Amino acid sequence: MRSVLRWAMVGWVSAALLGCSGDDDDGAPGGGGCDLRVAPGDNDTEALQTALVEARSNQVICLSPGTYQINDLITVGATPGLTIRGTGERPEDVLLDFSGQVSGDDGMLATGDRITIENFAMKNTRGNGVVVSGATGVVFRKLKVSWDRGSDTQNGAYAVYPTRSEDVLVEDCEVVGASDAGIYVGQSRRAVVRRNVAHGNVIGIEVENTIEAEIYDNEAYDNTVGIFVPLLPNLQQTESRATLIRDNLIYENDRTNFGPPGTVVAFMPPGVGIVLLSSDDVRVHGNTIRDHASTAIGIVGQAVMDEITGSAANDPRSDGFPERIYIHDNTFERNGQAPKGILATLGAVPLEAVVWDGSERSAGSAELCLGDPPQASFRNFGGVSGVGNPGAHSTDTTQHRCTLPDLAPVVVTE
Amino acid sequence: MRRLERRSARRQTDQENRPRAGRGRGFPGPRLGAASPRAALVADLRTTNGKPFVVLVLASWLAVGSLGCGEEAAEPTPSSGVTPPAHGARHPRLSDWGLFRDAPRQLPRDGVVPFEPIAPLFSDYTHKRRWLYLPPGEELGYSDEGAWELPVGSILIKTFSYPQDLRRPVSPEVDSAEERLMETRLLHRSSAEQWTAHTYVWDEAGQQTENKLAGATLPASFIDSSGEERQVDYGVPNLNACQTCHGALDVLTPLGLTARQLVSPIDYGAGPEDQLEHLEALGWLDRAPSAARERLVDPFAPGDLHQRARSYFDANCASCHREAGFAAGSGVWLDVASMHPESGDPTRWGVCKQPTAASGATCGLTYDIVPGHPEASILICRTASSEREVRMPPLATTVAHAEGVAMLSDWIRALPPASCTPD
C-alpha cells in the first residue's frame, strides 16, 4: 500500500512541477541547487519574506541577480538547515537595498541552526545588517554590507552579526561603514573569521565574550580600530577566552571615531591595530600591523575602561584582567607616531608597539608574553595613575620575556 | 469545472463563517494555490505515516488533476467541529478552521474557551480576545510556574481589534460599528514536534479574512483614553517573526497562558468564574493547581509597585529578556524569577547596569536603571520612544505605551538608591 502511495505522490509532484514550473527548477532539495527562487519584482519584500516562511528544513533559497527593494526586516526564522544564496557571479550582483525601509530595524534576522547566508550584498539597513542569534552552525560567506553615506554615526551598529551561537564561520565578506563593528561575533563558541575585508567601520572586526575563536587572513584598514577582542561585563557569557589572531593585514586604522556616544566603542582611541580588553588566552602572531597613529596593540583591563567611560561595571562575575597573552612573530611598522584619544593623554610620544595598562591581579599574574627574547617594543603605563605621568611608565620587557603554548586551531562544524 | 465555478461564485458572497446549511461535508484539505500543496507534501513526507497522509495525498493528487495550476481552489467547507489544515498546509480563511460559529462577531464554537491574562501584552492599544481549543478528550500538562504542555491538536487563538473609542467599554460580541477587527492569529500544535503559526487579516468591514504569510501594515485609527484621535500603522507580523518571541516552533512557548497570569475571574456565561477552576472543571488540567502558586497583579491597579512592574515585564519584556530568550545576550533579564522581590539580583534586571549590546540606542545615558531617576534610566527612554532604532519592545509595537511608561517611571522613582544613584 505504501509504495503505491509513494508512486501516486511522485506522479503528483511531477505533475505539479510540469504544470507550474517556476521555483523548483534545478537541483534536488538539500543538494547544490535551488529549492526556492526569488527574483526582483514588484514587491521584493513580500516575495523574499514569503519564500522564507514557506521554506522547509534544509532548503536552498536562491536570489537571482538584480536589485531588490526591501522595506522591512526580513525574518529568516528558526527553520534549520536553510541556505540563502545569491546566484550571481559576485556578491554585488544580488543587492538587497534597504534604503526604503519603513519598518523593522535590522536587515535580516535568523535564529535557525545550520544556516548559510552567502554571496549577496546589502546596503542601507536602518540597524544592523544581517543578524544570526542563538544558532548552532552559522556560515556567512561572500557577503558585502555597506551604507551609501559612508562612515556615519547613523549607520547600523554591526554589518555581519552572529551572536550567542556555536560553530560560526565568517569568510570572504566585505563590511564597510558600521557604526560599531563591521564583523561582530558576540557571546559565541568556536568561531572562525577569515579572509574578510573590513574598512570604514569604527571597529573592523570584533569578537566579544567568545570562547575559542580564530581570526586569520583578514584585511582591516581605515577603521578606528582594526581588531577588538573584549570581555564586556554584565553579559550572559562571562568569558572571552582562547582567541587566536594570526596572519592578518592590519593597517592605517586611524579613522576618527564615529561611534554613537555612550557605546563602549565610542571611547576607543583612533589609530590602534588591535585592542584586547580583559580577554584571556590570546595569541597574536604572524600579523602585519603598520601605520597606526597610536599603537599597534593595546591591552587594557576593566578598571581603565571604567575610568574612560566614567562609569562602573558592577559585575563580580566577569574577570576584568587580561591574562595569558602571547604576542610574537608579528611585523610592526610605523605605529605610535602621533597617539590619539586616551593614548595621547599618556604623555609619551612615540608609543611603543605594545601598550599595556599594567592591570593584573598580582605581580606577574597577567602572564603577558612578548617572546624569548622579547620581540616587540613595549610600554606599561601603569593604569589610571600613569595617565599624563610618563615618568611612572615602564618599557622594561624583562617580566615579559616568555612564551606560552600555541592554541589549537579552531575547528568549526558546518 | 462547472462545479468549481459555482463554488467560486458562492465564495464571493459568503460572509465569514455564517452558518452554511446544506453544504455537506467537504474535504478539509490544503489550499491548492500555487505553492501550498507542494509545501504540504514536503511536510507530510517527513512526518506523517497515518491515515491523514493517505487522504491528503490522494485528494491533493485528484485536485491537481482537476484544477490545474495557479487556479484558486474552492474554499474548504467544514460542516461541524474544528477542522485544522493538514500539517504543513494552510487554510485560506479563518472560517475554514471552524473555531467560530460567527467569526465576524467573534462568537466561538462550543469547546473554544476564552482566557485573559491579568497583565496583557501591550500591542499598540489594540483590544484582544483570546481562546484556547483542546481536541476532545485531551488534557494539558499543567504547571504552576512554567509553560503548559499543550496536546497535539491544540490551538491558541488571538484576535486584535481597534475599538473606535477607548473610553467606552468593549462588548464581548463584536459590533462592527463600534470596533474594527484587524487580525486573528492562531498557534496550532500541528504535530508532536512542531507548532504552526497562521494569521488572518480582516477586511475593513470586518467580514472577510485573508491568510497572510509575509506580514502587512494596516493603517488604523482610534480615539484614545484622553479623547484624542490617534493614527497607527498596525503591523501584522510575518509568520517567521512569531519565533522571535515564542521561541522556535519545535519548542514554542505560549506566552500569556500561564497559571500566574490567569488570575482574574471571567464570565463564561454563568457569572464570573476563576479561570483555572473553570479549566479544571472542563477536565483540561492533568493536575490540580496548587493554592500557593504565584499570582501576578494588574499593573494598572493600585498596589505594590515592584509587583506591578514585575507583572508588566512578564507580559511585555520577559519573552525575550530572560535567560533562554532572544535578548538573553543583553544581560537584562526581566522574567518573574529574575525579578523576584527577595531572591532576584537587581543588577540582573538592570539596576546600575551599563548596556553592552544596545547598538547605540542608549539615549546618551549610562545605566539601564538608575534608582530614583527614571529620566536617567535607559529603560524608560527606550520604552517611551517611538523611534524604531530605540524603541522597546521592538516587535508588535510602534507607539509607546504611555500608561506603562508612567507606571515604570513611578517604580524606578521609588526604588531604593544604589551605587549609580547620584548623591
Image (cartoon, coloured by chain):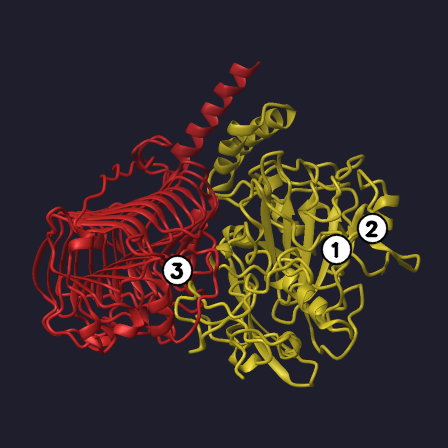
Category of crowding for the residue at label 2, using alpha-carbon neighbours closer than 10 angstroms: few (below 14), some (14–19), many (at least 20):
many
Chain coloured red here: A
Give the x, y percent position of residue B180: 68, 69
Looking at the picture, tell me which residue is in the foreground, A213 or B14: A213
Residue, disc 2: B276
Pair 2/3: label in front: 3
> Chain ID for label 2?
B
Query: Label 1's element?
Result: loop
| Residue A358 lies in quadrant | bottom left
Q: Position of residue A66 (x, y in %)?
A: 25, 55
Give the spatial CA distance, label 1 vs label 3.
Answer: 35 Å
Identify which residue, A299 or B32, lies in the foreground.
Answer: A299
The type of residue carrying mark 2 is Leu
Amino acid marked by disc 3: Leu
* Alpha carbon separation for disc pair 2 and 3: 44 Å
Residue A50 vs residue B219: left or right? left
Q: Is residue A84 visible?
A: no
Give the residue at mark 1. B260
What hue does chain B carry in this figure?
yellow
Which amino acid type is shown beneath numbered disc 1? Arg
Q: Residues within 10 Å of mark 3 (few under 14, many from 20)?
A: many
Disc 1 residue crowd, few under 14, some 14–19, many 20+, Cα 10 Å: many
Chain label for disc 3: A
* Residue closest to the eye, A198 or A384: A384
Judged by depth in the image, the label closer to the viewer, 2 or 1, is 1
Instruction: Please state if B55 lies on the left or on the right of B117 as rendered.
Output: left
Please tell me which residue is depicted at 62% across the width and 63% down the height of the picture: B316
SS at badge 2: helix
